[in-house]
Amino acid sequence: MRVHFLQHVPYEGLGNIENWLKLKGASISSTPLFQDAPFPNPDELDWLIVMGGPMSINDEAEFPWLKKEKKFIAQVIDRDTPVLGICLGAQLLASVSGEPVMRNKEREIGWFRIERIPLAAHHPLGALFPETLNVFHWHGETFDLPKGSIHLAKSDGCQNQAFLLGDRVLGLQFHLEMNPQTISALVENCPDDLAPGRYVQTPEQMLQNPEYFENNQALLSKVLDYLYKKGL
């Protein structure tokens, strides 16, 4: 399986997704957008993963590669290739689908509970989500759900936390892939984001519940298994 991921900043890589892909024997390649690197041929990919980043998808003047990235993502989706978008990646999927991305009413940074949308339990992917789960967040923007998508999860601080478009384009506003090292990298590189807020934790709070990492890893593996089967 040929898996390609789009990386917006050097400190936000695949995290625990990389371990899972290596166990599957996947061939992994990347486009480091912060280096204005070229995109691969969409026809040569079995799976695309779009990672997070501190910029807004609306910052095309500051990051002109965003226009090219959106075009590339649309090309991959048009080929019915499985796509996973995480945080900024989910916002890009919504934007490519014609929906606006805007500032959320709250910043969510740290571990906060999501709730599965009741109707989502009737879909094979939605049924993999527990009714509630503490997941890791680091975002200040949100999106409208793409038309025809299945709303999978919400939180107190952000209504649209996850969606499935068709049966193989998945957007997750939260980060299931995090481990202590990737969280520490965000803390080090984005300290201004940690200004106090209703849904903003301290770095110490982010690292004090090891069971959260285990629970997120369990759901991540189920979600990746679902997308893996769609890419075969």
Image (spheres, helix red, strand yellow):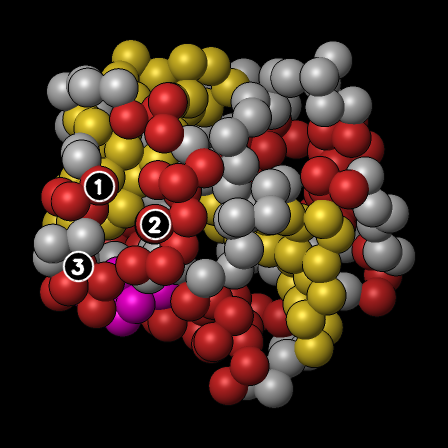
The 10 Å Cα crowd at callout 3, few under 14, some 14 to 19, many 20 or more, is many
Q: Secondary structure at mark 2?
A: helix
| Residues rendered magenta in the picture | 215-220
Foreground of the two, 38 or 69: 38
Answer with mark 3 or mark 2, whichever residue precedes in sequence: 2
Task: Please identify the quarter of the rendering in which residue 112 is found.
Answer: top left
The 10 Å Cα crowd at callout 2, few under 14, some 14 to 19, many 20 or more, is some
> Which residue occupies 36% across, 59% down?
181
Q: Kindly identify which numbered label has been placed on residue 212.
A: 3
In reply to whether residue 140 is colored magenta, the answer given is: no
Q: Is residue 199 above or below residue 4?
A: above
Q: Residue 35: horizontal and vertical position, in percent? A: 77, 42
Contact, CB < 8 Å: mark 2 with mark 1? yes
Residue at which label 1 appears: 203
Question: Which quarter shows the C terminus?
Answer: bottom right
Frontmost of labels 3 and 2 is 2
Residue at which label 2 appears: 184
Measure how far apart labels 2 and 1 are at the Cα level: 8 Å
